[in-house]
Image (cartoon, grey):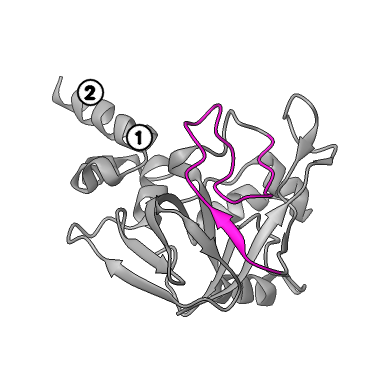
Amino acid sequence: MQLLSVNLGRPQPVPYTDQPDGVTGIDKKPADGPVRVAAPGPKGTGASGLAGDAVCDLRHHGGVDQAVYAFAREDLDEWERELGRSLANGCFGENLTTAGLDVSGALIGERWRIGSEVVLEVTSGRIPCRTFQGHLGERGWVKRFTRKGATGAYLRVIEPGGIRAGDPVEIVHRPGHGVTAAIQFRAVTTERELLPRLLDAGDALHPESLAAARKYVAAQAR
């Protein structure tokens, strides 16, 4: 398992975002050298966990529980075949493009060591948005991405440090509950009957998903 690239975005004005200033950092490019990774602070004020990476819409992105976004090169390759076009590392807005790692099948609370310093923990899958669709320029992209369910994974920073392309990735902790990023994604989007399962992941789960699961369970009990 390996880190193929560390991808950073710069603020760019675009016509397809509802971010108040009309800018986005979704178009990320591989960094040439090492990149510092650290917890960015709470959602709403904290941005990306990677130094030099722009998160422009703090209402929906960034913060400690969405500090880093990872996507598997294998899933990009599959999308290349389906879409009939080339997809460069970082083009899905991912900070980390990996090889040999089942990112969407990673368990909530699973921990990865990248290189010699950094440890990250999986919190949730990625929900597609209008900006993602506009960036790719594919009609019906939100529905299509949702239907496939290969979401990638958001991660929080457990141990900060530096990472770079070529670093090994090691799974150093794997919980026993069976709740993956893909299951979390399905539960909060198209299969809300799965929400009670998310409670098995406990506090490792993204707080917004944990709150949604608890609210669902409480409503079913009434």
The mark lying in front, picked from 2 and 1, is 1
x%, y% of residue 154?
47, 51
The one nearer the camera, 82 or 210, is 210
Residue under numbered circle 2: 219
Element type where label 1 sits in the image: helix
x%, y% of residue 66?
49, 44
- For this orientation, the residue located farthest to the top is 222
Please say whether residue 81 is one of the residues in the magenta stretch: no
The residue shown at (33%, 61%) is 111
Lateral position of residue 47 relative to residue 18, left or right: left
The residue shown at (53%, 72%) is 98
Crowd tier of the residue under label 2, counting other residues whose Cα lies within 10 Å: few below 14, some 14–19, many 20 or above: few
Q: In the displayed structure, would residue 211 be above or below residue 96? A: above
x%, y% of residue 31?
71, 65
Q: In the displayed structure, would residue 5 be above or below residue 58? A: below
The kind of residue on which mark 2 rests is Ala
Question: Magenta residues, as a range?
Answer: 33-56
**Tag shown at residue 207:** 1
The residue shown at (15%, 19%) is 222
Dominant SS type (magenta)? loop
Asked if residue 111 shows in the view, the reply is: yes
The residue shown at (65%, 40%) is 55
x%, y% of residue 214?
24, 30
The one nearer the camera, 72 or 190, is 72
Number of marks in the rendered image: 2
- For this orientation, the residue located farthest to the left is 221
**Tag shown at residue 217:** none
Crowd tier of the residue under label 1, counting other residues whose Cα lies within 10 Å: few below 14, some 14–19, many 20 or above: some
Please say whether residue 36 is one of the residues in the magenta stretch: yes
Asked if residue 106 shows in the view, the reply is: no
The kind of residue on which mark 1 rests is Pro
